Amino acid sequence: MARIRDVLAVGLLPLFVAGPALAQPEELDDRVSARSVVIEPLAGTRVTVGERLYAGVLTVASHGGGLALVEETTIDDYLLGIREVPFSWPEEALAAQVVAARTYLAWTLDRGRSANGRTYGYDICATTACQVYAGVGGLGSQEGLRWERAVARTSGEILSSGGQPVQAMYSSTSDGRTRNVEDVFGGSPSPHLRAVESPGETSPFVKWEFTFTRRQAARMFAHGGLLEGRLIDVTTQRTTDGEGPWTVTVHSDQGDVTIDTWTLRTRLNRAAAALYPDDFPAVRPGSERRYPQTIMSPNYTIEAEQFLARPDQGPLGLETRYRVRGGGWGHLVGMSQYGAEAMATRGVAYPEILAHYYGGVRPAVDDTLPQRVRVGLDIELRQLVVVPDGPVRVVIDGEEVAASELGAWTVSWQDGVAIVDPPDGLGLPPQVGGWRTFFDSRGVIELVTLRSRTAAEVRIVVTENRVVVSDSGWQVRQAGVIAVDLPPLGPRTALTVAVTARSPLGEDATTLRILGGTE
């Protein structure tokens, strides 16, 4: 049963009469050390962690290097959370992306968990190391609905060959042609990951270039373990399809070191970030924006070029710099996402798009996928805050501590264990009250506040002379101060502020009445 308390303030310069003080919550064991915390959303609840919104069951577990955050969710909800291409793209491109993502998931599950997956308890990661997953935020918008339709339209479809899912790799942009898998990563050829033409891509990264100074090149090669002694030259060796990776040779007075361009890309990107974060990634020609990465694909050459310079105001002389010319963004194996967008724009249907990039394989429904998947959202965290928008069930080290609670949970990592801070007022029914008023420079009330001792769904209704002027609707608010802006209070004005708080544990309400005086 809700309890309703009234507080009255009278006069043009209102006289505030304080309401009853909030009851003090019982003493609780606020902080708990734990190995794992499971937070299960109930009744359509979604939870926010950082800037991401999730609908699945979250597990926060303590490990030697920090906290690991894992979500268990349905296959469809996982696919709804894929953020690999803009939702505004043509529908056939979106459908092709969904099938590629579902197939990559199926291939990953079929292969078994990675080393990190076994350590942290997940099937697939949420980053570009697997495929980008960002939860359910952004769905429900007009563009988000287009992605939802693509997921529903292709329900259950994957690419398979010989009864097994193919390795449906994909990346952002090619430079007009994709690459054989063995020509980027080495190993054996695959009939489903062969180089094909990919014309008409509208990506700004089809071609790119920038320069290193000689000193920058020498320091970065040394940082990457590729140079001892004095740098003499850098040369690039290109291959044709099926002849293996492109390579770069670093020549020095201590000998030559040859490395494939994909591995070198990783080392140079790390070296640039460590040594020259203000210079790289380089600024794009004709733009104030930088490239997203220093080296963006395995398709590039590094060539020395000489130019006249006057170093330190000395005499003119020849200096050497290294120009990097490349194309594409990503590994360039399998489907080019911008290539799929170009094909869809030309009217090609998604089965044909997929067949083009994956060796003739077309999508078909497969019923062997499991119902749920565990997604590794993040690892080695020091702290995270889980903020539900509805009730959640919470289990700590196998023991249920909250069957249906509102409020934010904070988990910190200290000395190898998780420290759990529950919401204020855990286990208590809502209670609101403790009104305070704030006046403007003329002495007129413009703001009132009250406190809620627990997290609760709160509704605030303001009426003026019995006419509703604002209604907040039900919103989950954390324990603490709640502020209410008021309309101007004039003569013969009667304002009523009605606040109701509810949770699965109960309901409470309080009302503030403010009466304006006479002129």
Image: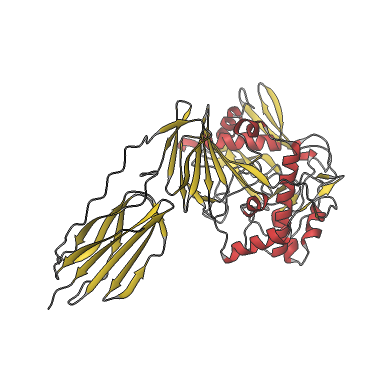
Q: Residue at x 37, y 46 (%)?
A: 428
Task: Count the labels in the image.
Answer: 0
Residue at 47%, 53% in the rendered image: 390
Q: Is residue 454 above or below residue 352?
A: above
Residue 449: quadrant of the picture: bottom left
Residue 180 to residue 416: above or below:
below
Q: 422 or 398, which is in the foreground?
A: 398
**Most distant residue in the right direction:** 162
Horizontal side, residue 254 vs residue 510: left or right: right
Q: Quick one: quadrant of the C terminus?
A: bottom left
Quarter of the figure with the N terminus: bottom left
Query: 73 or 90: nearer the eye?
Result: 73
Tell me if I can see residue 238 in this picture: no
Residue 296, percent from left and from top? 64, 45
Q: Nearer the viewer, residue 77 or 237?
A: 77
Q: How is the image coloured?
A: secondary structure
The residue depicted at 14 percent of the width and 64 percent of the height is 15
> Which picture quadrant has residue 128?
top right
The residue at the far left in this view is 519
Rendered residue at 22%/73% (across/down): 494
Residue 118 at x, y percent in the picture: 65, 31
